Image (tube, helix red, strand yellow):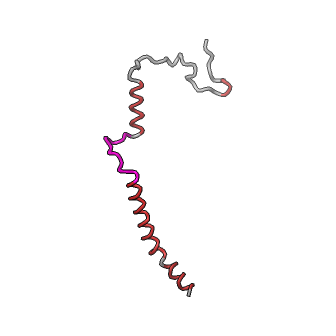
Amino acid sequence: MWSVLWAAVRSKAPYITFPVAFVVGLVGYHLERFLRGDPPPAAEEERSISEQREERKLQEIAGEDLTKVVSLKDKLEFAPRAVLNRNRPEKS
């Protein structure tokens, strides 16, 4: 008799566990929301990371004079370093 009972429970397990899991999840969701409280209302939509990065870059370069740049001739490391510096011309 036990084997017939276990076979019936095994075959009907999804019909039993889904409602139980649904009720447990529903109760947990509402309990957590009650304990934490309602989320604060958002004043404005959050900006994306790329938008924040662009805004920060614009603020950093706002006070700089962008016309004054270092000449490429003055840069020592303009060309990539070759193995053993064979292809790098010496500065005179």
Question: Residue 23 is drawn in which quadrant?
Answer: bottom left
> Which residue is rendered at x = 40% and y = 51% of the image?
36
> Where is residue 80 drawn, in percent x and y?
59, 26
Residue 74 falls within the magenta-colored stretch: no
Compared to residue 71, the image places residue 6 above or below, namely: below
Compared to residue 43, the image places residue 61 above or below, namely: above
State the predominant SS element of the stretch in magenta. Answer: loop
On the rendered image, what quadrant is the C terminus found in? top right
Task: Please indicate whether residue 80 sits to the left or right of residue 53 in the image.
Answer: right
Residue 37 falls within the magenta-colored stretch: yes
- Decide which of 88, 15 is in the foreground and name it: 15
> Where is residue 87 drawn, in percent x and y?
63, 23
> Where is residue 11 drawn, in percent x and y?
50, 79
Residue sitting farthest toward the top:
92
> Where is residue 47 drawn, in percent x and y?
37, 39
- Decide which of 66, 49 is in the foreground and name it: 49
- Decide which of 49, 11 is in the foreground and name it: 11
- Count of numbered tags: 0
- Decide which of 42, 48 is in the foreground and name it: 42
Region of the chain picked out in magenta, as a range: 35-47
> Which residue is rendered at x = 44% and y = 75% of the image?
15
Residue sitting farthest toward the bottom:
1
Residue sitting farthest toward the right:
84
> Which residue is rendered at x = 53% and y = 84% of the image?
5
Compared to residue 44, the image places residue 62 above or below, namely: above
Task: Please indicate whether residue 67 sits to the left or right of residue 2 in the image.
Answer: left
On the rendered image, what quadrant is the N terminus found in? bottom right
